[in-house]
Image (cartoon, rainbow, N blue to C red):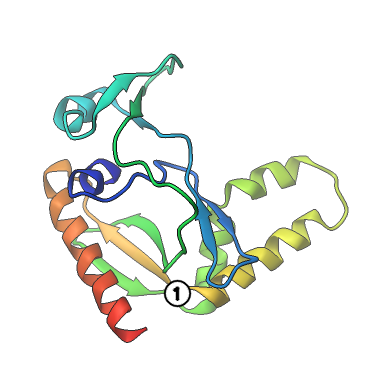
């Protein structure tokens, strides 16, 4: 999905983990290192979309490629969050606050680290940040079929959805 968005002219922000600062209103995101990790068949299908160069980091089952054009600068505001899911059709649905909190907590990379540490109050602080985030921006579930060929339709769905959100705001 990242490569399709990038091909349409959007800046690269991240391919995987998104760092969000909830202490701003609206929350802001910090772009990650400009690298994508793609399975070999995806590189063959979509690798030409990015200006890609081999990374020096080795990976067992994914190829790591550096992105060298249209990389986000600064820390853009976060308009909304999409929880990715697989379905039999492409659709976006609004998640109620409780479901949004559970999904965000479940998918957070931070919770994995927190669970291995024994630091008093760290888990509670993380959950408070998750709650602050879901209270600050709408959270949606984006269901899509697993099909590289259909990725342009998924991106168009997202573009239309974001355009609608911007008109409401």
Which residue corresponds to the image point at 84% horizontal and 58% vertical from the top-left? Answer: 121
54 or 74: nearer the viewer: 74
Image side of residue 77 versus residue 163, left or right: right
Residue 81 lies in quadrant: bottom left
Residue position for label 1: 138
Which residue corresponds to the image point at 52% horizontal and 78% vertical from the top-left? Answer: 97
Residue 131 horizontal/vertical position (percent): 63, 71
Residue 124 horizontal/vertical position (percent): 77, 62
In the displayed orientation, state which residue is furthest to the bottom: 168
In this rendering, is residue 70 above or below 93? above
Q: How many marks?
A: 1
In the displayed orientation, state which residue is furthest to the front: 74
159 or 38: nearer the viewer: 159
Which residue corresponds to the image point at 14% horizontal and 57% vertical from the top-left? Answer: 153
Which SS class for mark 1?
loop
Residue 34 lies in quadrant: top left
Image side of residue 142 versus residue 118, left or right: left
In this rendering, is residue 122 above or below 49? below
In this rendering, is residue 146 above or below 61? below
Which residue corresponds to the image point at 20% horizontal and 64% vertical from the top-left? Answer: 157
Residue 94 lies in quadrant: bottom left
Q: Residues within 10 Å of mark 1 (few under 14, many from 20)?
A: some
Residue 140 horizontal/vertical position (percent): 39, 69
Figure quadrant of the C terminus: bottom left
In the displayed orientation, state which residue is furthest to the right: 120
Residue 14 horizontal/vertical position (percent): 42, 43
Image side of residue 169 versus residue 132, left or right: left
């Amino acid at each position: 999905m990242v490569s399709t968005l990038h091909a349409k002219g959007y800046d690269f922000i991240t391919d995987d983990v998104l760092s969000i600062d909830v202490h701003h209103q609206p929350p802001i995101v910090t772009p990650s290192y400009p690298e994508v990790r793609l399975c070999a068949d995806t590189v063959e299908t979509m690798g030409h979309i990015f200006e890609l160069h081999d990374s020096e980091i080795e990976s067992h089952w994914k190829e790591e490629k550096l992105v060298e054009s249209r990389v986000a600068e600064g820390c853009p505001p976060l308009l909304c969050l999409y929880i990715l899911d697989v379905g039999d059709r492409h659709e976006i649905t609004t998640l109620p606050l409780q479901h949004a909190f559970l999904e965000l907590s479940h998918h957070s990379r931070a919770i994995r680290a927190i669970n291995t540490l024994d630091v008093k109050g760290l888990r509670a602080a993380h959950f408070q940040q998750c709650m602050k985030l879901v209270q600050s921006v709408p959270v949606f579930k984006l269901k899509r079929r697993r099909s590289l060929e259909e990725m342009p339709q998924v991106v168009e769905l997202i573009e239309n959805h974001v355009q609608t959100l911007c008109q409401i705001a």
